[in-house]
Amino acid sequence: MSSSSPVIDQTTVTSLLAALSLLIASYAMSLRLLPANASTSSRVLLIWHSFDSLIHFIFEGSFLYNCFTVFMPRTILGKAPLELHAPGVYFLGVKEKIYGSAYGSSPTAKLWQEYAKADRRWGGADLTVISLELLTVFIGGPLAAYICHLLANGHGSVGPKGIASGKLAFWMIVLATGELYGGFMTFAPEWLSGSPNLDTGNFMYLWVYLVFFNMLWVFLPLFALYQSYCALTNAAPFANAIESAKDMKKRA
């Protein structure tokens, strides 16, 4: 826990604008890919999954890139400022180097240095975070893009009370469940250990970086789960009616 004052500089503004630009791009994509009479739920789902995919590919993909390629020789640093591993444990088994965006100077390294003000694990190479991000970038990102593909190709509802297809509902459930589980596994170790890596004493870092941004990956996956549940439970009676009609036709 820290009570430091937030440092709002060019990196802070650029990072926030970068996130906003992805949201704007996702909204523009919904206007381009969905018909004008698409339901509000379909539009929200496409905007969300597009934004989700872009965040995974661009932001979190850059996090992994920094973790695996950016480093400083441990002999130069002496004791590393980000000791995220147990004694004797080294990322990639390399004792001579310490990895993470904290030691880079590229725009993406600076972006993660900014977020690391709220959660210092994102400045280094935390094993749990990297393990989750490997799944997020290489599975969650493509799956979110595939869901956008399904929505853009008629699997979503077009009227105010339309029902999503079963295929769309299934993959949204898979992704939303993964997002919720990943979020829990990211923060549960911190909560259980008194949040040693989180700055919970700073209003901006706590409520903007940690709460607002991360709660997007709670409420919107829950919304996707709700929409999927409605689609599957509403689709079942129609499927049963069709089968019954077929049986009656055969008997006739």
Image: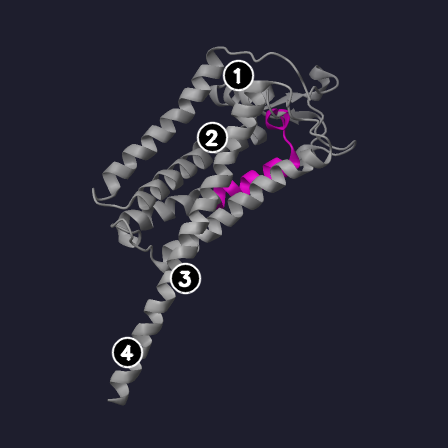
Callout 4 touching callout 1 (CB < 8 Å) = no
**Residue shown at 56% from the left, 28% from the top:** 210
Residue 179: in magenta span: no
Q: Quadrant of the C terminus?
A: bottom left
Q: Quadrant of the N terminus?
A: top right
Q: Specify the segment rendered in magenta.
A: 120-139
Q: Amino acid at mark 2?
A: Phe
The picture places residue 192, in percent across and down from the top left corner, at 72, 37
Front label number (2 vs 3): 3
Front-most of 60 and 78? Answer: 60
Task: Give the image quarter of residue 95.
Answer: top right
The picture places residue 244, in percent across and down from the top left corner, at 32, 78
Q: Residue furthest left?
A: 36
Helix, strand or loop at mark 2: helix
Q: Distance between the Cα atoms at labels 4 and 3? A: 19 Å
Answer few, some or many: residues within 10 Å of disc 1's Cα (few below 14, many 20 plus, some between 14 and 19): few
Where does label 1 land, which residue?
A: 105
Q: Distance between the Cα atoms at labels 4 and 2? A: 51 Å
108 vs 159, left or right, is right
Helix, strand or loop at mark 3: helix
Where does label 4 land, which residue?
A: 245
Where does label 3 land, which residue?
A: 233
